[in-house]
Amino acid sequence: MTNYSFPDNFLWGGAIAANQAEGGYLEGGKGLTIVDLLPTGEKRREIMKGKVTSLHPLEGAYYPSHEAIDFYHRYKEDIALFAEMGFKALRVSIAWARIFPTGEEETPNEAGLQFYDDLFDELLKHGIEPVVTLAHFDVPVNLIEKYGSWRSRKLVPLFETYAKTVFTRYKEKVKYWMTFNEINMLLHLPFLGAGLVIEEEADRMQVQYQAAHHQLVASALAVKACHEIIPDAKIGCMLAAGMFYPYTCNPEDVFLAMEKDRESFFFIDVQSRGAYPAYAKRFFKDNRITITMEPEDEKILKEHTVDYIGFSYYSSRTTSTDPEVVKNATSGNVFGSVSNPYVSKSEWGWTIDPKGFRITANQLYDRYQKPLFVVENGLGAVDTVASEGEISDDYRIDYLRRHIAEMGEAIEDGVEIIGYTSWGPIDIVSASSGEMKKRYGYIYVDRDNEGKGTLQRIKKKSFYWYKTVIESNGEKL
Ligand code: BG6
């Protein structure tokens, strides 16, 4: 028996993104997006940070997004497997460049629109609610070449047109939306997060926060359009969450942890409360950042706040002002964290901290008092296929079990959570490394880091475990 229970209509499911699952990168008239320029290996991290040498795929390099796991052609088979697990929701993203290949056509690309119509129909046929992100790491490349991506105000109306187009087209089918995936990623991986190519001599923070302002206004305009076009829909923001712990109770460490948290909250404070937070004024002044705004921006931000807070949680983070401790920082996740001696780490160095999940959920709910939607959580790990074809991923079950239990505790703490879509229910390409061997799925995909393999789908042990979790509405973990 558990201490907690999940609401009856809780949205259990999984989450994937177009760029990491679909493949078919030029099919159906799709244009190039930033992820199509990210190879695997060392180069990837450099490019994601904004050091871009070419805006075209290079000869001979391997680009995992080009075929990914071929969800573009195999989505029916995959959705049938999700349905077998009893999914109530699937989070997907729409690739902007399938709808507007260069981002600025007058008329949308019908083949792209039709693809998502078919995808949503397939989900609805199985009783699975589509939860749709408008932008998940995939700015059309043309907008980078022509305007420098989100550093330009030009992208605001272009994104608004894209958002209105898909709201109008899918208004009968999609009732849960999100604007920008992990909007705070713009500060850490500016090319991946926002298509920003940042020159050595540029004032990095100035570029990033001006781009952030454009995304925040575009997000508010999308919220406005969604409320007007689909009055019965809910639209949220999406934060890469995970609170910062101070390494010690030294007030210097505590203050730094607060500042680190604010780096991320900054975005959601605007999207959820409708205004730049008070602390932004000093932060901008100290860092000599000047945000150029249009006269109507403050009003737009004020009037069109999100309905719920979508967030991903993989890890907590720890910070210190002590140079000796900082030497010991992990490179495991892009947020840069010193090692926390009380928690373990994944094979990729990501902190494993289920209690941190409960703390983060409480922190977000206290701050925003809006429903939360956990739209990513999971363990990236290497899986081995035994000779009989079984995949005994007990480590994944253990990670998920402990996190779901803490989510239950958070609900018992009074936090309103509407759903849980674990990341990568089927193995997909890793965003940070481009690898296939960093797997999150309940379903194995036969494909390796070099793109070899049959793409066959195999159910892992966790497949049956998650099915039971959903069937029992979180009782049987
Ligand atoms: C989140 C992203 O940052 O984490 C996903 O929204 C990503 O796109 C996920 O895949 C896990 O990260 P990774 O690098 O292990 O794929």
Image (tube, grey):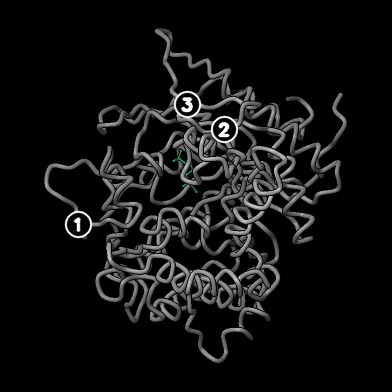
The earlier-in-sequence mark between 3 and 2 is: 2
Front position in the image: 308 or 455 = 308
The earlier-in-sequence mark between 2 and 1 is: 1
Disc 2 secondary structure class:
strand
Q: Mark 1 against mark 3, which lies toward the viewer?
A: 1
x then y, percent, for residue 393 = 53, 19
Residue shown at 70% from the left, 29% from the top? 469
Distance of mark 2 from mark 1, alpha carbons?
32 Å
Q: In this rendering, would 245 be left or right of 434? A: right
Identify the amino acid type marked 1.
Thr
Disc 3 secondary structure class:
loop
Residue 100 found in image quarter: bottom left
Q: Which residue is mark 3?
A: 381
Q: In this rendering, would 114 be left or right of 144? A: right
Rate crowding at label 3 as few (under 14), some (14 to 19) or many (20 or more) other CA atoms within 10 Å. Answer: some
Disc 1 secondary structure class:
loop
In this view, 450 is above or below 163: above
Q: Which residue is mark 1?
A: 53
Q: Which mark is residue 351?
A: 2
Residue shown at 30% from the left, 27% from the top? 454
Q: In this rendering, would 280 be left or right of 135? A: right
In this view, 101 is above or below 255: below
